[in-house]
Image: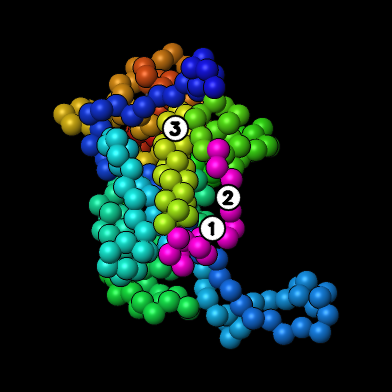
Amino acid sequence: MSLAEIAKVTPIAPAVRNRILILDVERLPGLSQQSWWDRGDLKNRYIHHETVTREPRTTILCAKWYDQPDVMRFAEWDKGGRKVFLKRIHALMAEADIIVGHNLDQADVPWLKGDFYLPRIGHPHRPDLPPLPPFKTVDTLKVLRRELRSGAPFKSLDAFCKIVGIPAKTDKYDRDAMERAVAGSDEDRLRLTDYCEGDVVATQWLYDWERPHIKNHPALFVDGEDKLTVCNRCGSETKPIAKRYVANVMTYSMRKCVNCSGHSRISIDPERLSMVRGV
Ligand SMILES: [Zn+2]
């Protein structure tokens, strides 16, 4: 891909102090035993927990602080095993103000919470971790669904990144690779972790690409700046514009970010404190 084809993105202002964690996981699939008379029997079969010999579980996590260059790599087979693996991820997530990922709200976060608090059938480790402190999430897939809907027909991380010109992985997913990795194959461990790391890097690009469109992005705090005039998407300065935001009962003055062009309004509600919200 030539440089000209690489998508334009707007990074977050360096003065922003939120701890933003981008993450992605890889998992081992579950296994269950089924009784059957005919191959067609399994078509609408439900998985009963009594038949399960192994539950799906997270085995690799790669994560990156938004403002740090390095991707951190964690795996169940690292020294200390699953106990240390989960403890490290838990500690990392406990530090984050905002966690970013593709399909994070439906997948990574609930899967990880299950890993933190529940034993997994098929693995002897019994976790004993405290609840996480609150954090906000930005699910880059949800943003595509909400803002672009059928206007972006291909929403997988890989497809979307290719279409807009974000450097992304080219490796194909191999269903059996994780089985071999858990069984001890160094080659598969390395390849799957590299694949996961690649997704984290692509997710940060996508996050940078999407942010001007994320009107409800969690607030960004900037050292020594007036909060109300800071862009909620990138932490840069905003300037008042002539156009007004038209709501149902009132209209509001609008501001526009000088960096990412995102719009915001200052609402003055006599019953509440002033607040800025994306529009
Ligand atoms: Zn901005």
Q: How is the image coloured?
A: rainbow
Residue at point 43%, 64% (across, down): 184
Gap between marks 2 and 1, in whole Å? Answer: 8 Å
Residue at point 36%, 77% (across, down): 125
Closer-to-camera residue (178/155)? 178
Is the residue under label 3 in contact with that under label 1 (CB below 8 Å)? Answer: no
In the picture, the disc for residue 154 is none
Residue 162 found in image quarter: top right
Q: For the residue labelled by badge 3, is the local secondary structure a helix, a strand or a loop? A: helix
Residue 134 relative to residue 207: left or right: left
Looking at numbered disc 3 in the image, what kind of residue is underneath it?
A: Trp
Q: Which residue is mark 2?
A: 173
How crowded pointer 1 is (Cα within 10 Å; few <14, some 14-19, many 20+) is rated as some
Q: How many marks?
A: 3
Q: Position of residue 187 (x, y in %)?
A: 45, 53
Q: N-terminal of the two: label 1 or label 3?
A: 1
**For the N terminus, which image quadrant?**
top right
Which residues make up the magenta segment? 170-185
Q: Please, is residue 242 above or below residue 27 in the view?
A: above
Nearest-to-viewer mark from 3 and 2: 2
Q: Please, is residue 170 above or below residue 185 in the view?
A: above
Q: Position of residue 139 (x, y in %)?
A: 47, 46
Q: Which residue is mark 3?
A: 205
